């Protein structure tokens, strides 16, 4: 029996390199289908990436909304109409309000460029460098109303080098994101990962702590 691919809606704001990685993972066998890409920015390069693969796109321009609530209501209504099995935030730079996030509880993922719970929020690469951290990375987590605070599923960890600057760190974190995010989506698509109450369950076992992959091994396994 052929399984139905997992239906995804991907939310973006910017360049969309994570979207591209998901598209390529689907090409390579990830059992999912991107129904629509939604951006809050009309100029997002991610929209061009989607359109070039004939993936339908929609824009809800946050600047045309008079309030956060109005933006959320429009997004929620579009998501309800599309009714995907999973909403994937891929560089989506809007904070979503409580009611919307609650409605999509357990069906909404985010990727964040830090080793959560450390360095929530913006400018993570710069803040990690300024603090002189030895380790940096990225995390995939279920979205809850707490900003970058939902249950973390998996992380990729890389060592900060003495000669790293913001650009090099960002690029190395991106490389990890492009492997980690499709990996987690694949677990969901194959029914291996669910959220029970607020605990991710992988292969029927609770993930009390995020799975942490070392970047070199993660990249090696993906190559
Ligand atoms: C990624 O690094 C992602 O982790 C980050 O934005 C970048 C988007 O890149 N997301 C956040 O900071 C969300 N808090 P992309 O548009 O090339 O995928």
Image (cartoon, rainbow, N blue to C red):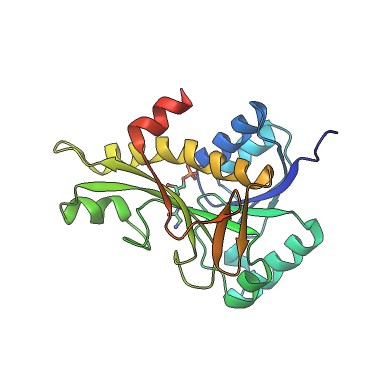
* Image coordinates for residue 142, horizontal then vertical, percent: 54, 60
Question: Left of 28 or right of it: where is 217?
Answer: left
Residue 89, quarter of picture: bottom right
Going 55% across and 68% down the picture, which residue do you hit?
A: 198
Going 14% across and 38% down the picture, which residue do you hit?
A: 162
- Extreme residue in the front direction: 205
If the image is split into quadrants, where does the N terminus sit?
top right
Is residue 41 shown to the viewer in this render? no
The answer to whether 87 is drawn above or below residue 165 in the figure is below
Going 66% across and 27% down the picture, which residue do you hit?
A: 27
Going 40% across and 25% down the picture, which residue do you hit?
A: 220
Is residue 63 shown to the viewer in this render? yes
* Image coordinates for residue 70, horizontal then vertical, percent: 65, 75
- Extreme residue in the right direction: 1
Question: Left of 46 or right of it: where is 130?
Answer: left
* Image coordinates for residue 9, horizontal then vertical, percent: 69, 50
- Count the marks: how many? 0
* Image coordinates for residue 173, horizontal then vertical, percent: 36, 41
The answer to whether 154 is drawn above or below residue 2 in the figure is below
């Amino acid at each position: 029996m052929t399984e139905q691919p997992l239906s995804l809606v991907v939310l973006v704001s910017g360049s969309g390199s994570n979207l591209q990685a998901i598209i390529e993972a689907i090409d390579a066998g990830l059992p999912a289908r991107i129904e629509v890409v939604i951006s809050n920015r009309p100029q997002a390069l991610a929209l061009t990436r989607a359109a070039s693969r004939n993936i339908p796109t929609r824009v809800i321009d946050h600047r045309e909304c008079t309030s956060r609530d109005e933006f959320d209501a429009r997004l929620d209504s579009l998501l309800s109409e599309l009714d995907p099995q999973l909403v994937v935030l891929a560089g989506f730079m809007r904070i979503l309000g409580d009611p919307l996030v609650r409605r999509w509880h357990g069906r909404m993922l985010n990727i964040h460029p830090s080793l959560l719970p450390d360095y929530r929020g913006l400018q993570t690469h710069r803040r990690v460098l300024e603090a002189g951290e030895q380790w940096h990375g990225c995390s995939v987590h279920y979205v809850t109303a707490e900003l970058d605070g939902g249950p973390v599923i998996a992380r990729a960890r890389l060592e900060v080098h003495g000669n790293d600057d913001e650009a090099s760190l960002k690029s190395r974190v991106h490389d990890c994101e492009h492997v980690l995010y499709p990996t987690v989506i694949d677990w969901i698509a194959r029914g291996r990962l669910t959220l029970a109450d607020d605990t991710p369950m992988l292969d029927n076992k609770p993930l009390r702590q995020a799975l942490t992959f070392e970047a070199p091994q993660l990249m090696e396994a993906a190559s």
